[in-house]
Amino acid sequence: MKMKTKIKKPSIILGLLVFSALIGLIMTNSNPRKDQAAVSGAVLFISPDSGTYLVNNKFSVSVKLDTDKEINAVQATILFPTDKLEVISLLQEKSILSFWVAEPSYSNTEGMIQFIGGLPNPGFKGEGEIFTVVFRPKKEGRVQIKFKEGLVLANDGRGTNILREQRGAFYTFVSESPADLNDDGFIDIADLAILLSNWGVPKNPKADINKDGRVDIMDVSMFIFNFPNQ
């Protein structure tokens, strides 16, 4: 039986030093983005929008709103695959919405989350959380969570729908820690070296921790996230 993956403590420090140097290199060599004209309206999105998680280990994501105009009502339906994923609970404690026409609810049979909520005048403007979803991966694989439909109504007395975009998320589920890239039972500097040597389009598919076809800063983040807490 394969030993439990664990980390060699000195390698954490060395690995993080290398990671810090890598961040500096990336920031120095990054091409600046071209300025784009701001697009007015509201965006519903799931955060984080990607990640790698262990099967049977619960993880949380936030359903969020970003709007540049005051709004007073939000409605949406979110879909998820029931063969690989199930909802454990929905948490509303940090919600920007103060009342619910239909409280957030879910069906693990239909793979659906629904809600209708609002807040009084003057409404809400900015970025905020609507609620948190606690998921549990059921088996290995890559899944997409997406919005089926949605409404974001402006606080303008006319109920104008200002929703312009809905952003879902992609997650990867694995049975063992994806950070052990050389399968030696440890997460250490050797694994980090494999990851960095495959930067860009990987020759070693294991270095692509989030399985998006590239090795980049997201994979480094997932590598650090998967350090065992021991």
Image (cartoon, helix red, strand yellow):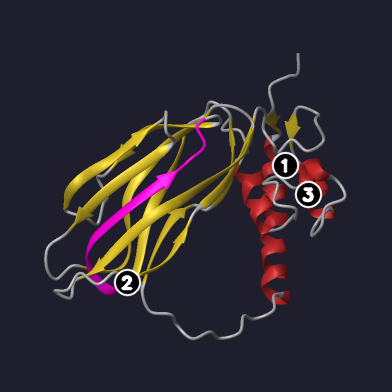
Inspect the image, locate mark 1, and give the three-letter code of the amino acid beneath it.
Ser
**Disc assigned to residue 162:** 2
| 183 or 142, nearer to the observer | 142
Q: Position of residue 75 (x, y in %)?
A: 29, 55
| Residue extending farthest top | 1
**Disc assigned to residue 195:** 3
Q: Is residue 122 above or below residue 6?
A: below
The N terminus: image quadrant = top right
Q: Which residue is mark 1?
A: 11
- Which type of secondary structure does the marked residue at label 1 adopt? helix
Q: Position of residue 41 (x, y in %)?
A: 36, 74
From which residue to which does the magenta span run? 69-82
Inspect the image, locate mark 2, and give the three-letter code of the amino acid beneath it.
Ile
For marks 2 and 3, the one nearer the N-term is 2
| 225 or 210, nearer to the observer | 210
Q: CA distance from mark 3 to mark 1?
A: 15 Å
In percent of the image, x 88 and y 50: which residue is there?
203
Horizontally, residue 140 falls left or right of residue 137, namely: right
